[in-house]
Image (cartoon, rainbow, N blue to C red):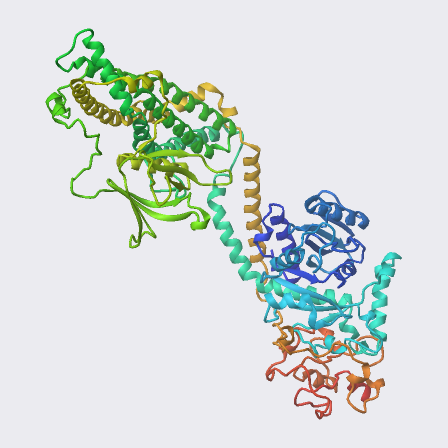
Amino acid sequence: MGNRGMEELIPLVNKLQDAFSSIGQSCHLDLPQIAVVGGQSAGKSSVLENFVGRDFLPRGSGIVTRRPLILQLIFSKTEYAEFLHCKSKKFTDFDEVRQEIEAETDRVTGTNKGISPVPINLRVYSPHVLNLTLIDLPGITKVPVGDQPQDIEFQIRDMILQFISRESSLILAVTPANMDLANSDALKMAKEVDPQGLRTIGVITKLDLMDEGTDARDVLENKLLPLRRGYIGVVNRSQKDIDGKKDIRAALAAERKFFLSHPAYRHMAERMGTPHLQRVLNQQLTNHIRESLPSLRSKLQSQLLSLEKEVEEYKNFRPDDPARKTKALLQMVQQFGVDFEKRIEGSGDQVDTLELSGGARINRIFHERFPFELVKMEFDEKDLRREISYAIKNIHGVRTGLFTPDLAFEAIVKKQVVKLKEPCLKCVDLVIQELINTVRQCTSKLGSYPRLREETERIVTTHIREREGKTKDQILLLIDIELSYINTNHEDFIGFANAQQRNTQTNKKRAIPNQGEILVIRRGWLTINNISIMKGGSKEYWFVLTAESLSWYKDEEEKEKKYMLPLDNLKIRDVEKGFMSTKHIFAIFNTEQRNVYKDLRQIELACDSQEDVDSWKASFLRAGVYPEKDQTESEDGAQENTFSMDPQLERQVETIRNLVDSYVGIINKSIRDLMPKTIMHLMINNTKDFIHSELLAFLYSSSDQGSLMEESAEQAQRRDEMLRMYHALKEALAIIGDISTSTVTTPVPPPVDDTWLQPGPGHSPPPQRRPPSALLPPGRPPSLRAPAPGPPLLPLPGGAPPGPAPPAFAAPPIPSRLGPFAAASDPFTAPPQIPARPARIPPGIPPGVPRRPPAAPSRPTIIRPAEPSLLD
């Protein structure tokens, strides 16, 4: 396979465009293309249709191009068009091409003149085109039309910038000649993304519509408002010609005649017109692709390397291979077991930093949620004392007791222990829910095989539900064991003697470890939610909870204390979340109906999540602040006011009350310790063992291997796309590597004075239009402005013959009227071929500068190179 020449570069890019567009990846490659930018009335569509020689673009008022059109022109002996979204169909009628563009545009954007950055890919094969790849972008507009959004101008601007900002794109800035060039939106946007002018080519349209006595000669000669790559003028069909279905070939002939016959343009007619613009764009794009090859190769190689690992398992993929299915099944079940264990036991890899999951949530249930549920079952003081007094009286019967009966203590203790069943069973339910959620998260990796995922989730969930019953039975058995024997010889039990010594008037106090020290239980941010707007509204503070008080500060430095609230007589109650509020709220209030903070009977504290609320509640429990009990007055409670205790009975009630408090504390401590151990052993560890040892057997027995390992449609599509991407990258790298690196390209033209594109205050660029006579030096007759219409005078192939013309050609180029001879190569890339070029010369030279004879110019002048042939 020999070296490929530069003429194959544009077809190469087309091939890359097709390969990656078909898998939705073309936008990530930044392939070299030409982006066509201009206003709504600039004539972009006519320029593109002139390239093709056919009417195929939608027309109408307002925004017609509402999606980018990637137009690939390919030289071919036959003429037809095809779209990437319906590649199997060839369009030979270009009216159908227009209808398909309109239909595809409406399919994505709707019919309300909306826009979309999703491109339409159109490829045109024709014997009348040169190889080109262009992107027709929506016209720049200022005013919304119809149902368009009010920010349509900014949407279009952002879309255009998205395409022209790529360093791989050339910018074709289309501007009509009958508007002020200095106000061209296309040139301004090009200047924003290409300040050096390395990628911008100017196109001037509607030259035939300029006012009588004006022309764009100085602009086209790149003298008045210069661009580094210069300007090319074209003449499109008028609206009347379009409506009359004027043939484009006839329009191109009329364009040629216009330039040859116009006195201001005939001397540069060979460098004007649509055919010349096609040749220039073909050469410029080819050179640009050549320059972009190293970075394109590097990008393709990096993408190929990133795909290697994923594609490795797909290279020799056979969907129906039983060995592959068996291997995949074993690997996935094993990986599922590893993932489940990591989520439960914790792991350093793939740590979720956004929320708690798996084992961390179960840990919170064990040590925050479950203790909170236990304390919520805390007995009510009044009810408890009444029950103790009734128990003592009922045990004594008709007799008046002299001693405190221990049977009353045992009856009250058993009644309180039975109440522990509800929070214990609720704890099991919470853990089961977390386990099932963890199983679902782990099976998400089996999404490639829907049947396998469904069966795995069903089998493991069923096993967890089976263990649920056994775990709950064991928990209830633990409570029954506690009920079966009341051990009053426990080392932590206060005993009868100590219970009597306690002051009967002292309420139950909070246990404060390390008496004398202030234990900080929790720190964190909370929002005080119920401060009125007149007093500043809701505000976030840094809260510090100790065993004695709740304090809040301005920030976590804890230097500026706002308030300190003692915890005496405080309780917690839930507050319903507001209709528009996203916060979760709980309240602290004083049981003696006193103000808690300023004039507030309660302060509402808000957290971002319910988990934070539960965590704070658990912390308050540790500090001895308990939740509010629902006060329901019963008939027995109503009789309490009429019931009076004698002093002896009061002492007995207080004694048993202290004994019950001590023993129930021992039971709670034991249950809080045994519950996590029981659940871990009977449910969590058992489930892990089941997944590792028995899940595979259950899967084989539930269904045949073939149905289990059937791929989902999405997975098959993903595999096919990845393989296509991989092979497209390899093919692209092979083609790029085979291109000749010795091909000579022309350097980029030197910089020009383009400050006119950035007009500041008080700066006004010179007018674009002026009479033809003003372009001539004094005394120069108009008849000598240019040679008569005809073929190019000096094609100037590789070596120029001696004569008067070559010295004129060898003069250092400036942005001036170069004449037809410059059409030999590229008017924009030819100047850098001249060695020892002097410093850049400003584009405008006063008419009074003396001129040298044309045969031997020693410095740049404004002599028109075409004139020596007439003077000779």
Q: Residue 554 location in percent, x, y?
A: 34, 52
- Could you say which is closer to the camera, residue 280 or residue 402? 402
Residue at 79%, 78% in the rendered image? 267
* Image quarter (top left, top right, bottom left or bottom right) of the N terminus: bottom right
Q: Quadrant of residue 184?
A: bottom right
Residue at 84%, 85% in the rendered image? 782
* Image quarter (top left, top right, bottom left or bottom right) of the C terminus: bottom right
Q: Residue 864 location in percent, x, y?
A: 75, 84
Q: Is residue 678 left or right of residue 24?
A: left
Q: Residue 381 location in percent, x, y?
A: 27, 25
Q: Is residue 421 in sight in this rendering?
A: yes
Q: Residue 37 location in percent, x, y?
A: 69, 62
The answer to whether 659 is drawn above or below residue 823 in the figure is above
- Could you say which is closer to the camera, residue 276 or residue 462? 462
Q: Is residue 825 in sight in this rendering?
A: no
Residue at 10%, 22% in the rendered image? 497
- Could you say which is closer to the camera, residue 685 or residue 747? 685
Q: Is residue 292 left or right of residue 860?
A: left
- Could you say which is closer to the camera, residue 183 or residue 308? 183
Q: Quadrant of residue 61?
A: bottom right
Residue that extends furthest to the front in the rendered view of this protein: 642
Q: Quadrant of residue 545?
A: top left
Residue at 22%, 34% in the rendered image? 510
